[in-house]
Every structure is written in C-alpha cells, then in structure tokens.
C-alpha cells in the first residue's frame, strides 16, 4: 500500500527536484510494410504508424493530468529502416524518411527513431543506401532520428563502417549548417546497440521485439542530487545506499506510468529504462551529483570513480522496482544537455579525453559533443573507433553523437535550444588519424566474445 508519506515525497520530487517521465516511446514493427514499390512501402508505413500511435499522445497527456506526473516526451521507434527498405527497387530512401516525418507530425510525437542500419559485420546494398541517404534525410526532416550500429562484442568493429560514418557526420553537419549542424544531434553511431532503448536519438524497434510495445524512460538527476546532499561527510557506502533507494522510488513511478499506458493503449509493456537523463535546467544535472560527492568540478581526478558508483547504484536500485528493466539504464553524460557539464566544459575543466574515460563506466558514450567545424572526417571516425573499442571490449553499449559545428571553433558555442541545450565547442587532438582509418577491414572480436 502507498502511504501518505510516500505520496508527499513524490510530490516534492516532482515540484522541486525536476522528477519526470522523460519519454513514453511506442515501438512499432514495420517489417510487414516492405514492398518492391517504394510508393506502396511508404503508404503502408504511414498507415501503420498513424493507426498504432493514433492515441499515444492523448493517452500520455491523460495520464500526466490524472496522476500529476510530468511526461516530457511522447515518441515512436520503428524497425530499422534498412531492413524494411531493402526490398524496395530504388536507390533513394529519402522518401521513406519524409513519410516517417509526416507520420510523426500526424500523431503529434516529438521524435521518431529508427532510420537505422545495423552493419557491425558488413553491409547489404540496402544498408549502404540508407547510410548514404542520412545527411539528406536528416536535413529535410524535423523529427526523424537516425542511428548506425558499427560494432558488437561478438563481431568486432566494422572499420569500413566507422570510416563511412565520419564522412556521413561531416556531410550532415554541412547540410544543416544554418542550424549549427543540428542534423548531427539526431544521429548516433553505436557499438552494441540495444533493441528496446526508448531514448532518442538512438531508439529503434529491434528484430526481437513484438509487433507493438510501450517502453518508458524515466529520469531524475535532481532527485538523486537532493538525496545525496544529506550524505555530506559520510562514506561512499552510505552514498551508494542512498542512490539505490532513490533510484527505486524513481523507477516505481516509471513502472506505474508504463503499465497504465500499456493498459489504456492495449499494447504490451516492454521495459522501463531507468537512466538518469539530464536537461540544461539548473538542478537537473548528472555533473551536479558527481560534484556533490566531493569533486570541485566534474572532469577532475576522481570523476570516473564517482560516475562508476552512481551508475552501479542506479542499476541496483532500479532493477528491483520494475518487472522489466531494459534499454540503457544508468547515467547519461551528454555535454550540451547537462548544465553542470556545460559549465565545466566552458571553464576548460572537462576534456574530450576525460569524457572518453568516463564512458567506460556510464550508460552510453560521447553524447552531444560539439567540436570545431573543420575537424576532419578521419578524426571523427577515429573518435568513433575509440568509443566502439570501449564498448566491444567491455561488452557494453557505447555511442557517439558528435557535432562538427560549421564555421565555429574552440571557445565558441552552439545553442540548439530545448532539451538539446547549448554546447561549448571542445578541442580535438591535433594529430592525424587518417592512416589508421584508411586501413579499413574489421577489428576482430575480443577473446571475451567466445562465451558459448
């Protein structure tokens, strides 16, 4: 039974500590939409999305109003489009991106993920067509998000795909230059991508998922920060225990919303992703949590250890609060979307190298990193390769969402507004990686991939 004290505690978390449901994401299979005629394929895609998600937004709004729980975003993820479009007798997949955008607008969601290719071991013709269409697709659409998986622990790293994605990111930045390279903020390069991630820009509806499913992503950095502020001077055992208890309460709220949305929409409940997803708002920052543990600034020595404690405690606390925990689940460290990270980067206290070290123990990877517009495609590819190697060797999901901001350099910033926030331009290493990237081929899977 829920006590009056627990109700009052939840109200306080919502009103004063930025607690919210970050997203309700409906996953929709589009495998039955495939057709050789791209016009027919597009028609089927539009009809299916608008039918399945017709009541998604209004249902989310009703739950939000009735329960008093803020639900920030309502989103859709779909089957990787490279799989759906592979049978289309066309070289141009951009019309599919356009119809996805049209369907997203029709049902009122803010983002739709799944303009995706899975190429960790190699390319099909459809994969290459989709990847090479990404810059144009993201420049012509508002709500479509794209992702490409270039590595897995079982397959190793597809370095041909890594090299190609460096060029794709550069081209995407140039085609959206008037918006500061905004297209790159909707493009993620993964290692070990998961099939049930509700967060954008990396969400897609995996091959092992049901016909339609509801996944919920919760958040609450402000709640965790407030909770551990009472632990000043106490040992890390007490800090970890406090985070676990807080993560449990946050996840229970997500479970409640997920089950209610599932029931009202008549769609199976998938997972609760209990990731701490920050925003640019003051008081809603993962960096603030790390600094509350005793760091003068995020980025200093000890940051990686503090983040490891946070990530582990969030998982331990949250996993007991939901019947199905999935997605990424842990702590995100996007620079532009976290007020504390922005502050540290602007003061020169947070480097790309330190962020890379932090990705060894967080939920994802180098997220929403702005770099100089003249950064070479090979350097971007090398950054992707490093991050993929961390994911492959450690058997975890890692990702790169990097924006080479056209016409800007170190010391400047780019402001995307909203949840995407403001990103200071961070320096990259001046030495070339071109010879390394030009080798191509595959970096073999590590020994720990042999688990059968």
Image (cartoon, rainbow, N blue to C red):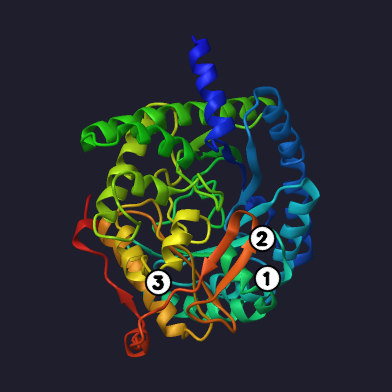
Foreground tag (3 vs 1):
3
Front residue of 26/430: it is: 430
Q: Residue at x 54, y 46 (%)?
A: 198
Front-most of residues 217 and 295:
295
Disc with the residue nearer the chain's start (3 vs 1): 1
Q: Nearer the viewer, residue 48 or 250?
A: 250
The residue to which callout 3 is attached is 384
Is 263 on the left or on the right of 2, as rendered?
right
Residue at label 1? 137
Q: Is residue 154 visible?
A: no
Q: Answer with mark 2 or mark 1, whichever residue precedes in sequence.
A: 1
Q: Position of residue 380 (x, y in %)?
A: 44, 78
In this view of the protein, which residue sits in the foreground, 366 or 16?
A: 16
Disc 2 to disc 1: CB gap under 8 Å: yes
- According to the picture, the residue beneath numbered tag 2 turns out to be 144
| Cα–Cα span, label 3 and label 2 | 22 Å
Callout 3: helix, strand or loop? helix
The percent position of residue 30, horizontal first and vertical second, equals 65, 51
């Amino acid at each position: 039974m829920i006590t009056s004290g627990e109700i009052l505690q939840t109200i306080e978390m919502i009103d004063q500590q930025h607690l919210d449901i970050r997203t309700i994401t409906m996953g929709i299979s589009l495998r039955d939409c495939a057709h050789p005629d791209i016009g027919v394929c597009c028609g089927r895609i539009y009809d299916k999305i608008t039918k399945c998600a017709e009541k998604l937004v209004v249902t989310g709004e009703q739950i939000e109003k009735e329960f008093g729980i803020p639900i920030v975003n309502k989103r859709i993820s779909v089957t990787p489009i490279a799989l759906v479009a592979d049978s289309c007798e066309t070289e141009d997949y951009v019309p599919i991106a356009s119809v996805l955008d049209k369907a997203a607008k029709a049902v009122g969601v803010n983002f739709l993920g799944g303009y995706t290719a899975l190429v960790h071991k190699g390319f099909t013709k459809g994969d290459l067509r989709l990847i090479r269409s990404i810059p144009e697709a993201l420049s012509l659409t508002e709500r479509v998000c794209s992702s490409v998986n270039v590595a897995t622990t079982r397959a190793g790293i597809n370095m041909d795909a890594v090299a190609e994605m460096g060029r794709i990111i550069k081209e995407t930045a140039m085609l959206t230059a008037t918006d500061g390279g905004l297209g790159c903020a909707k493009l993620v390069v993964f290692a070990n991508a998961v099939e049930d991630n509700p967060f954008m820009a990396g969400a897609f509806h995996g091959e092992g998922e049901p016909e339609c499913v509801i996944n919920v992503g919760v958040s609450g950095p402000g709640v965790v920060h407030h909770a551990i502020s009472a632990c000043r001077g106490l040992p890390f055992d007490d800090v970890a225990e406090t985070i676990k208890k807080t993560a449990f309460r946050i996840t229970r709220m997500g479970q409640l919303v997920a089950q209610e949305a599932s029931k009202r929409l008549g769609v199976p409940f998938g997972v609760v992703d209990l990731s701490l997803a920050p925003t640019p708002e003051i008081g809603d920052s993962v960096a603030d949590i790390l600094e509350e543990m005793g760091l003068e600034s995020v980025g200093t020595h000890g940051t990686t250890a503090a983040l490891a404690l946070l990530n582990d405690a969030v998982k331990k606390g949250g996993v007991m609060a939901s019947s199905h925990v999935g997605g990424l689940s842990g702590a995100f460290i996007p620079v532009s979307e976290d007020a504390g990270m922005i502050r540290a980067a602007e003061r020169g206290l947070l480097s790309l190298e330190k962020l890379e070290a932090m990705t060894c123990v967080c939920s994802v990877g180098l997220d929403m990193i702005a770099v100089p517009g003249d950064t070479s495609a090979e350097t971007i590819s090398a950054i992707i390769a490093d991050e993929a190697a961390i994911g492959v060797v450690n058997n975890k999901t890692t990702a790169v969402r990097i924006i080479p901001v056209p016409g800007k350099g170190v010391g400047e910033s780019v402001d995307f507004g909203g949840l995407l926030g403001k990103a200071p331009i961070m320096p990259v290493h001046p030495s070339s990686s071109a010879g390394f990237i030009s080798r191509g081929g595959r970096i073999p899977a590590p020994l720990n991939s042999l688990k059968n």
